Image: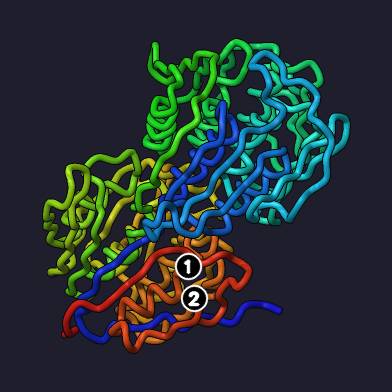
Amino acid sequence: MPPQPWPAPRAGAPLRAEVTVPGSKSLTNRYLLLAALADGPSVVINPLRSRDSRLMLDALAALGSVVEHIPDWENSGVPAVRISPLPALTSASHPGPIPDSSAADSPGTADSSVTAPTTGAVSIECGLAGTVMRFMPAVAALTDARVHFDGDPEARVRPMGAVQHGLRDLGVEITGPGAPAPGGEGHLPFTVHAPAGITGEEITIDASASSQFVSGLLLTAARMPYGLTLRHVGESVPSLEHVEMTLQVLTEVGVKVSSPAKHTWRVEPGEIRAFSVRVEPDLSNAGPFLCAAAVTGGEVTMRGWPIVSAQIGRRWTELLPAFGAQIETDPETPTTVTLRVRGRQLRTPGAVDGTAELTPTVAALAALCQSPTLFTSVGHLRGHETDRIAALVTEIRRLGGSAEETEDGFEVTSPVTHGGLVRSYADHRMATFGAVLGLVLDDVEVEDIACTAKTMPDFPQLWAGLLAPASDAAPGVGPGSAADCVPGSGSVSASGARG
């Protein structure tokens, strides 16, 4: 049964609210993976609890990690997850056979354990999570199992070739329907098997389609027998901030990393020390809520904004003023501030460059401006959850605006003029794009709001709380919500009257 369209609520008046968003998806899944590769149990505090992070936990459990959910970490009121190391990683040179055992519970639940058989097959479900499909194959290559990767139908068209070719050059077998021909592009489904272990230490890949190709190989490299030197060929790496994030978290857990030349990275072999870390708020997911102030002329406050962050969402403090909003910050701690966004007259900066995963939300701002906005250096978005460039152009046109694709992006040339159905394409950021437009336009409906569960299962309630006093906000999930996902930890409350 197709999902029921979700009526995106109209603001009706300038809003005033305080927002708390869950932990960063990008940081959560990096820390979870590194915890499974560490030399002892590690704790990730304030992890994002969403479909993407659940799929990562399930993948790690399928390979043998024990996953324990802790609802209240040290009486802080904040949840955490404790991850045991993969049992296969008894040595950095080549892991021995993985002892056979059966699952105590289902993957991803408290005290769950699934151990990969020595010669058997393990299946990993990727969903639409790029961090699972592109990060976990290198982890699988450290085990003796044949590990089969597959995902949602939409995931089967996402490029995978750079990771697959890179692993092949390291001596890993890549087989199955999605395995690439020499020099060709690969995709899901495929199987990873490394019976001789990882035998190489230098690879050259083309990561022009996604920075996740680089991150996925670097994250595991310390547990490879010789470490890894990775070179990228191509003009640029999209979303380079995410590679910087990867280098940052590796350094935090004691891995020696360097960049001896442009688009070249070196990870030295060695142990990954066990760690305990608190995940920052997801600054990308904060975007729609902050933009709500900009498009309505209201005010939205967010506590705990990191002063320094590797997340690309840190750019909201630059992007929102470029579109006419006012930004204020108040000190909180040595590392965080309270961020306040006040909407004023919406205007376009004329052009924005390299906005990566923020692009659909920035496009909602641009679609409400009277003058054109050109998006550049975002051509890689054609290979995301959907072809985001084509999707944005189509949906802006559907709502009466005009937009055109360019070689490395697109241009919004006239604003949207009316409501209607906004297709989500099973893409969480297209769904929130529609929600932002619904604040201003009458009768906007989002095709499938449930796809926001990929990174924010509570999005429908949080969005409703943005527009209503906390006492009036519906306690349940709105139409089309994802009931099978663990609730997140975000919240929205009114702080004063609207209008």
Q: Nearer the viewer, residue 420 or 307?
A: 307
**Disc with the residue nearer the chain's start (2 vs 1):** 1
Amino acid on which disc 2 is placed: Val
Q: Nearer the viewer, residue 450 or 28?
A: 28
133 over 54 or under it: above or below: above
- Distance of label 2 from label 1 (alpha carbons): 6 Å
Kindly identify the residue that appears in the image at 77 percent across and 23 percent down: 194
222 over 58 or under it: above or below: above
190 sits to left or right of 83:
right
Amino acid on which disc 1 is placed: Ala
Kindly identify the residue that appears in the image at 60 percent across and 10 percent down: 226
- Looking at the image, do the residues carrying marks 2 and 1 touch, with CB atoms under 8 Å apart? yes
Kindly identify the residue that appears in the image at 54 percent across and 19 percent down: 271
* Secondary element type, mark 2: strand
Residue 390 appears anywhere in the view? no
Q: Kindly identify which numbered label has been placed on residue 431.
A: 1
Q: Position of residue 3 (x, y in %)?
A: 62, 78
Q: Position of residue 149 (x, y in %)?
A: 73, 42
